[in-house]
Structure formats: structure tokens, C-alpha cells
Amino acid sequence: MHMDRLEPSVPDPDSSSLLTDFYQLTMAYSFWKAGMEKVEGTYHLFFRSAPFNGNYCICCGLERVISFIEDLRFLESDLSYLATLNGNDGKPLFEKGFLAYLQGLKFTCQLDAIPEGTIVFPFEPLLRIQGPLIQCQLLETPLLNIINFQSLIATKASRIVRAAQGDPVLEFGARRAQGLDGALTASRAAFIGGCSATSNVLAGKKFGIPVKGTIAHSWVMAFETELEAFETYADIQPNNCVLLVDTYSTLAGVKNAIEVGKRLHRKGFELSGIRLDSGDLAYLSIEARRMLDEAGFSHVRILASNDLDENIIQSLKTQNAKIDIWGVGTKLITAFDHPALNGVFKLSAIRKPGGIWENKIKISNQSTKVTTPGILQVRRFRQKGQNIADMIYDIRIGPDKNGCKIVDPFDVTRQKEIDSSADFTDLLIPIFVDGHKVIASPSLARIKSRVDQEKKSFHPTVLRLDNPHLYPVGNEKQMNDVRTELMIKARN
């Protein structure tokens, strides 16, 4: 009996080099065929607009970028697959010589990047990669995939944590995430963005993130009564007892939780908390808090879930809801209201063997799609411990020695002088030099603490959830003049 060949249920973890768009490979082949394998390019990865009607992003995903590059290689199975691809004439699309070239390919580029956990703004390069065009093109899609998604989730988490005003936020999104890998990387990004823990146990194992959870409604429904379900769970998990009280009647569930709390106390344990997962969370949390306090359980914390996001949490805060911990799932793990960051990867300079870097610019009828040529760096200025402006400049030109001035590339009438006394830091730092990693990866805890420090370094109005203040970011004036000249030349 004929049986179809079983396909693997998940991708081979050792074969990620084909995680790219098809046109990257056809372009790489065409560069090779045109004898351009030694021509180098400078590419920048940046996003054009901030998500969630906000003003900023949390840069995230660099560690995964590093591991992807370190594992970059084409296996026999990859090359065998590429050899089966045909053009519209039925003949092989890729020559055997190109497949042999891919088999021997080694990463030799320079990669500079903004560290994870840094607050960044539209049009600032988050990554700069320089090296052979073929290598850079093959990395475009995975770099965008990694940075776009993780930065998006970290940013969403930071907004939710800000709305929670210091209360712990637990990431509960694994079951609603976009696939298994999406759940794992999103848990990491959410922790960097400010979440205190995750329900994703694999993320706990891989990244050292604290894991938290409660019981589900199915546990309560599996017993004759809610009280029996609570008592049984408390007997088994006396040191980890958080009870879900809304399976039938929320306030009746609180009463049952109080009875179980008394029973636990007699045994030398304490009820950790109750969880509200439906209904009017403001009213129910206020009533639950009153009932718990009157019963002598002021230490018992109230955890709330139920499709929360920063806007709902902010609203519940204004209603004086008595919620101590926030469990956020779907709207965090999927970035529900802004499902994709519009990051792009653009060529800005090119160098032939033995030559010098030549600027490249992309022109468009949409002003925001006109690129900035050069080899770019981001300089962040601060005064009195607070960030005041960011300047994008070409490292070959450098800032004007007679005084720094930034220009809005989309409205040259908007300019800002930078005080010469201001301190500064260049944000892009070397990660790979000539293909070799030159920096030690920071711990996840250190990356998370960077976010906390970053938030303190900006005026609160820049980070507010609604109608944020526009933080000054612009091109260094000399570089912007070069950009304008190239735009005029390209249009003529």
C-alpha cells in the first residue's frame, strides 16, 4: 500500500540558513554569477514608525541574532534541496558552482548593534552590517524577523508594565502565541520589557525567567464542589496556593478561598492569592479585597487576568481596582493591536575590492521611504542625567566640530542645536569584527536592568502611553546636506 512520506513536524534546528526569502538566494546567486562576490555593502536595520501609537521601541533580539550568525552554514540537505529548484524553463535555478560556494561560506562581516534593552526611536539604525553583499543579503530576512518581533513584544511589555505602576506583571501568553518559537522568544522579550515572570516553563528553563501560574477552571470543574477542589489543591500545593475563584460565582468563590485560607493557616501555611479572570474586575477586586481583609487575610494578593492590556490596566487603576498582580496573555504575546513592527534593511554604501565606500540612496515618492546614505552611527546626548536628543551621523564625516546641529530629514526647517557641554554616547557597538564575535553577551537580568535605567533617563512625557512628547531625533546637518544633494541628483 502506498503511503505518503511523513514530513518533519518542526524545522531541523541545525538547518536554519534557509530561513530566508527566496529572492535573497536568487540575488545572492546573481551577485556570484556577476562576479561580485567580493563587493562589500553597508546595510542598516531600522524601523520607520513606533508601534502602539507610541514614540519608542525597546531594542531586543540581539542575542538571537548572534546565535543565528554563529550557526550560519549550509548543510548537505540544504544544498540538495536548492539543487531541486528549477526555473521556468525546467532547468536548475542554481549552478553547482554556486552551491559549492554556499557550502564553503563563512561569515566574515563586521556587525555593530545597539545593545538589547536600549530605548530607540524611528529611523535610528539598530544594526549596521558591513561585508560581502552575498552574506549581507542572506542575513536580511532572519535579522528582520528576529529584531522586529522581539522588539515589538518587549515594547508592548514595557507599556503594560508602565500602566501597572509598579505592580508585578506576569506573561501568560504561550497558548495564544504565534507558534512554538513565537511563544519562546516572546516570553524572553516580555521579560526584558519588564514582566516579572512567565507561565512558559520552557522559557523558564532556557532563559532563567521565573515561572508562575495558578489553576484552571477545569480543575475546579473536575470536583463535585468548588470548595472540595480548593481544599484538594491546597492539600497538595500548600506552599504554592493561588485559587481561581470565578468558575461559578466570583464572590462565592472568594468565600470558599477564605475558608481554605483558614485551613491552610491552621496547618502552618498561608494562602498566596486569588485570581479573578472574568467580570467587572474593578468591582470584584474591591469586594474581594474587603472580604479578604475582614477575614484577616490582608496579605493575600489579588491577581487579575482576562484579555488585559495597558489601556484596560490604566482604566482599572483610575477606578481604584484592588489588584496586586496582572496576568497578561493574548494582547501581550501577539502585540494584539499592532501585530508587526515595520523594520526594514537597506543598503546605504558599497565598496568594490580595493576601492572606497560609495554612498547609495533609495528614492521614493513617499518621503519616509527615502533612505539615508552612508555608514551611520547614533549619538545620544544627555544633560543633568537626562537624555535630550539623538543624532544620526556618518562616521566618515563625523559631527560638525563647530557645533552639533540635527535636522529633521523630512522637514529641514525643523532643526535643533546641541549644547556643546552635553555628554554623549555612541549607541552602535562592535559585535562581530571580520566574522569573529568580540563582545561577551550580557545576562538576561542585566539586559532587563538596562531597560529600567533607560526609562529613568528620559523625561516621563516621552514614554507616556497616550500622546507622548516627541523626543528629538535627527540627521547631523552635514550628512543631511549630502543626503539632499544625492536626492536632487537622483531625481534629475
Image: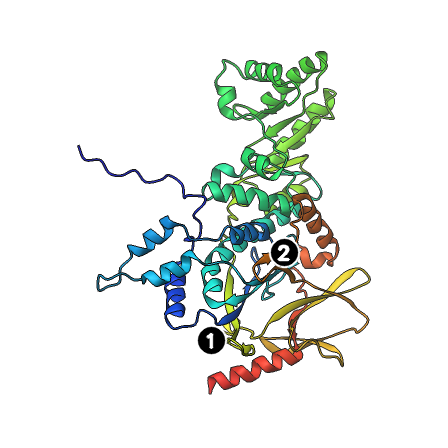
Quadrant of the snapshot with the N terminus: top left
| Residue drawn at x 30%, y 38% as measured from the top left | 6
Residue sitting farthest toward the left? 1
Work out whether residue 249 or residue 90 is closer to the camera in this orientation and state it. Answer: 90
Specify whether 153 is left or right of 393: left
What's the CA distance linking mark 1 and mark 2? 31 Å
| Residue drawn at x 67%, y 62% as measured from the top left | 427
Q: Which mark is residue 290?
A: none
Asked if 426 appears above or below 339 in the picture, the reply is below
Query: Is label 1 in a helix, a strand or a loop?
Result: loop
On the image, the x and y values in percent for residue 139 come to 48, 59
| Residue drawn at x 54%, y 79% as measured from the top left | 355
Residue that badge 1 annotates: 364
Disc nearest the viewer among 1 and 2? 1
Asked if 351 appears above or below 301 in the picture, the reply is below
On the image, the x and y values in percent for residue 106 come to 49, 58
Confirm or deny contact between disc 1 and disc 2 (CB under 8 A): no
- Going from N to C along the chain, the mark reached first, 1 or 2, is 1
| Residue drawn at x 67%, y 37% as measured from the top left | 321
Query: Is label 2 in a helix, a strand or a loop?
Result: loop
Work out whether residue 188 or residue 28 is closer to the camera in this orientation and state it. Answer: 28
Specify whether 362 is left or right of 444: left
On the image, the x and y values in percent for residue 69 come to 52, 54
Amino acid on which the number 2 mark rests in the picture: Asp
Coloring scheme used: rainbow
Residue that badge 2 annotates: 466
